[in-house]
Image (tube, rainbow, N blue to C red):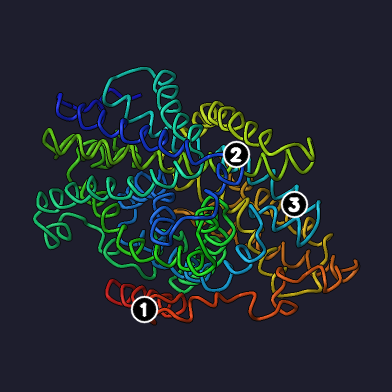
Amino acid sequence: MDSALRLDASWVDYTLVALYFLFVLGIGWAAKSRVSSSIDFFLSGRGLPAWVTGLAFVSANLGAVEIIGMSANGVQYGFQTMHYFWIGAVPAMVFLGIVMMPFYYGSKVRSVPEFMRRRFGAGAHLVNAISFALAQLLIAGVNLLLLAKIVNALLGWPLWVTLVVAALIVLSYITLGGLSAAIYNEVLQFFVIVAALLPLTIIGMNRVGGWSGLKTAVATEANFHTWPGQGLSGFASPVLSVIGITFGLGFVLSFGYWTTNFVEVQRAMASESLSAARKTPIIGAFPKMFIPFLVVLPGMVASVTVAELMGDSPTAKPNDAVLLLMRDLLPNGLLGVAITGLLASFMAGMAANISAFNTVISYDIWQTYVVKDREDGYYLKFGRIATVVATVIAMFTALLAQNFGNVMDYLQTLFGFFNAPLFATFILGMFWKRMTPHAGWAGLVSGTLAAVGFWSLSLGADPLLQLPGQGTAFLAATIAFVTDIVVSIVVSSFTTPKPDAELVGFVRSVTPKDHFEDAAEATLPWYQRTVPLGIICLIMVVALNIVFM
């Protein structure tokens, strides 16, 4: 760890951090009394209101991707980073709420891989469950590494010590209270994170002389416009850049992540009703629109105020931008709030990964294929053990993430491998009843292999194909998606589909309309209904794209 990242914290800052940890552990202990079955541990008993699951939905994503990855993108690409929110998140979140949550919640499955098993059978289910579990361990390592980095910046401990300490903190409250503890902590963490980032943004913007001062200091004019986003996409042509961002990020990667990633979907599935489950991602989409101003702007400010990030040969990585800006700008007290916010962010991200992992490994792999038909208490105990094992493995995957200067490069690569082909399988399977079980697993495997094969061409000192920015990840995801679709159609033409009776609740054309509706929602005022909320959300995000074009 770089000693330059030591933060000059005082007793006030340490006290704030300690109080936060007491709250976190207290929530875990309080939630423990509600855990009497595996469904309580893994899905909170399906009893949480929409506002809780909605805030948890967006907070679960406020981990390393948002805080470190997006601020690092702010250093490199400026406002082009907004695409990850306004094109790469909000539309897919609205689609999830309106179109896909009725499938998930209405079918009463306990996980996204379980949906795959009931739609396509054991082959696709096992491929999805294993790939998802692996992805969560890799992504949890990112959050754990950055959580450890905060502890190191405070105390100067060696990496292995900080990894162990950070892991134990998260492990304690998930093991005690399961998903309920994770979700209620995520609600708390959402407000703590905002309280941490808002002062940093305001002080940083004041330091550079406001909006006009930032525009003067940042030499690249393109960093103040979202479109055509050539720096981010890596395409020299403006037309290809717009197509790459819209299709590669806005459709394949975005819809692949938000609509099939059980880390997010699990929060909605813990809701008290179908109406609450549908509104969960849409409620989360409203703050999601404005969070980039709290993460991208600090990255841009850091690029022109932090000495280690300036000049032709910067001595720090973009991932360090937020920590370095905190070191330079925040007085004691506010520094403690900011440190607590970052700790909350990385804990929320890691807890989301681990809680989703333990559900899938317990229900979809262990119970389905290894040890069947045991009493519920056995799987509850196994889930707690799986939580411990996953946390230990995440300590080792954290070391892999060290090799990337910008964690977004690492994460987008993983999403291209796992989420892009999964989305292709889901969307085809939900709307085309002719798609067969054989096509389900064949499409997933071929799509993933195609993405890995393409990505491997960009490795080495003399790569066959390499795009600047994150264009390689966008293109790999697109290739995975198209490959999955083509292979699924071809395989379906030679194999036998399931009968219609087995597809009710999983394919739209054979499912009764009332399966996708909640009668209670019809009695609510229009502003509390799913579709009007989604339309308002889309109008707002279009307006933001126009204003900052």
279 vs 84, nearest the viewer: 279
Instruction: Indicate which disc, 2 or 3, sits on the residue closer to the N terminus.
Output: 3
Judge from the rendering whether residue 267 lies leftward or rightward of residue 197; answer left or right.
right
Would residue 467 be visible to someone looking at this image?
Answer: yes
**Vertical comparison of 411 with 379: above or below:** below
275 vs 445, nearest the viewer: 275
> Of tags 2 and 1, which is closer to the observer?
1
Residue 79, x across and y down, in percent: 31, 61
Residue at the disc numbered 1 = 527
Label 1: few (<14), some (14–19) or many (≥20) C-alpha neighbours in 10 Å? few
Residue 308, x across and y down, in percent: 24, 36
Q: CA distance from mark 3 to mark 1?
A: 38 Å
**Vertical comparison of 541 with 294: above or below:** below
The secondary structure type at the circle numbered 3 is helix
User: What amino acid is labelled 2 in the image?
Assistant: Asn
Q: Which mark is residue 358?
A: 2
> Of tags 3 and 1, which is closer to the observer?
1
Residue 238, x across and y down, in percent: 43, 71
Residue at the disc numbered 3 = 125
> Of tags 2 and 3, which is closer to the observer?
2
User: What amino acid is labelled 3 in the image?
Assistant: His
